Image (spheres, rainbow, N blue to C red):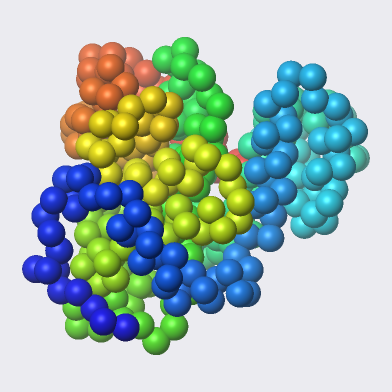
Amino acid sequence: MQQRTESSVDPSVWLGLEMYTDGTTLARRSPQLERVLARGLLPSIEVAARLLRLLRDPEFQLREVSRVIQCDPALTARVLGLSNSAVFARSRPCRDVAHAVTMLGAGTVGELAAVAAVGEAYGLRGVEGKLRSHAVATAAVARELCVQLGRPTVDVFLAGLLHDLGKIVLLQGAGDESYGTGGMDYQVLLQRRAGQSCGTHLLEQSALGFDHADMGCVALEAWNIPEPIPRVIGWHHSLERVLQEGGRTAELVCLVRVADSLAHVFAGPRYDDRTAGALLREPAAMAGLGLSLDDLLPLIPQLRHANSSSAGMLD
C-alpha cells in the first residue's frame, strides 16, 4: 500500500474544507475495513441501533423491546448484568429483560444496550480498554451537557459512544501495514497519543490518506446504522466543514467535541486546573453551540459527576 508522508498532506484538509467523500472513499476500499467486516466486529451494534430507534417511539410496546434485545443472547446477558449492578440496583433484582425495561426505564435500557454492543468490540485492557472507557465517558458527558442546556438528547449518547469507533476498526483490522513514519504500527501510534485529545487523525491521514473518523463512518454505514450517526462520526474532525452544513448534524458534532475534550480532562490527575484550558481548545465547537466559558463553567460539577458515574456502565 502506497503511503503518504506528513509533508504531502494538504493543509486545507485539516481546516475541515475537504470533500466529505475524499477520506471515506479511501477508508471504504481499505484492507483494514475488509478484514473487520469479514470477521465481524460488532455483532450487536445493529440490534442496539434497532432498539434505540424503537425506544424513540413514545408508544413502543414492551414485548417488542424485549424481543429485539433477546434476539442477541450476549446482549441480553449484558443488559441484565448491568441492570443488576451496584450502580443501577433497585429493591428487586431484574430477572428478565421486560423487568429490566420496567425498572430502569426505556432510555436507560437503550443506552445500556448500546454500551453492551460496543463492549463486544472494545477490549478490557491496554489501548482498547482505554478507548472503551473514554467512549462511554464521552457519551455520558455529552448526554448530561444536553440535559443541562435543555437540548434534545436524541442520538447524542450513541454519537459520543461511537465517535472513536474507527480506531477500533484500525486496531482490529491491522495486517502488515505500517502507520506513520519509521514503520510505527497503529497500536504504538495510539499509545504515543494516549491522554491527548487531538493529533491522532493527522498521523492517520499522513499514513493512510484517511483517518479514524472516515473509517468509523464507513464501518457504521456497512452495518446499516442510520443517519445522522455515520455522518456525525465521519465529520467530528472536520468542524469547519460541518458548521457550514449546519443543522442537527453540526450540533451533534459540536456536543461530541466538547464532551470528548472534557472526558480527557476529567481522566487526568488535575482536571480542575485544566478544565478551562480544555474548553478553550474547542472554541469553534462552543461557538457552534452558542456557548461561552461563562455559560459552561457552572455546569462542570454535573458534567464531572456524569463522567465518574459512566464507569458503572462498564461493570
Q: Residue at x 20, y 45 (%)?
A: 17
Would you say 79 lies left or right of 37 here?
right
Q: Residue at x 44, y 65 (%)?
A: 28
Residue 153, placed above or below residue 122: above
Instruction: Identify which residue, 81 or 22, lies in the foreground.
Output: 22
Residue 241, placed above or below residue 22: above
Position of the N terminus, as image quadrant, is bottom left
| Residue 25 placement (x, y as % from top left) | 38, 62
Q: Residue at x 13, y 59 (%)?
A: 10
Residue 190, placed above or below residue 216: below
Q: How many marks?
A: 0
Would you say 228 lies left or right of 54 here?
left
Residue 308, placed above or below residue 287: below
Instruction: Identify which residue, 170 or 221, lies in the foreground.
Output: 221
Q: Is residue 67 visible?
A: yes
| Residue 308 placement (x, y as % from top left) | 49, 36
Q: Residue at x 45, y 77 (%)?
A: 31
Would you say 123 lies left or right of 75 here?
left
| Residue 131 placement (x, y as % from top left) | 45, 56
Q: Is residue 303 visible?
A: no
Instruction: Identify which residue, 302 or 71, lies in the foreground.
Output: 71
- Quarter-wise, where is residue 44 in the image? bottom right
- Quarter-wise, where is residue 119 in the image? bottom right
| Residue 96 placement (x, y as % from top left) | 89, 40
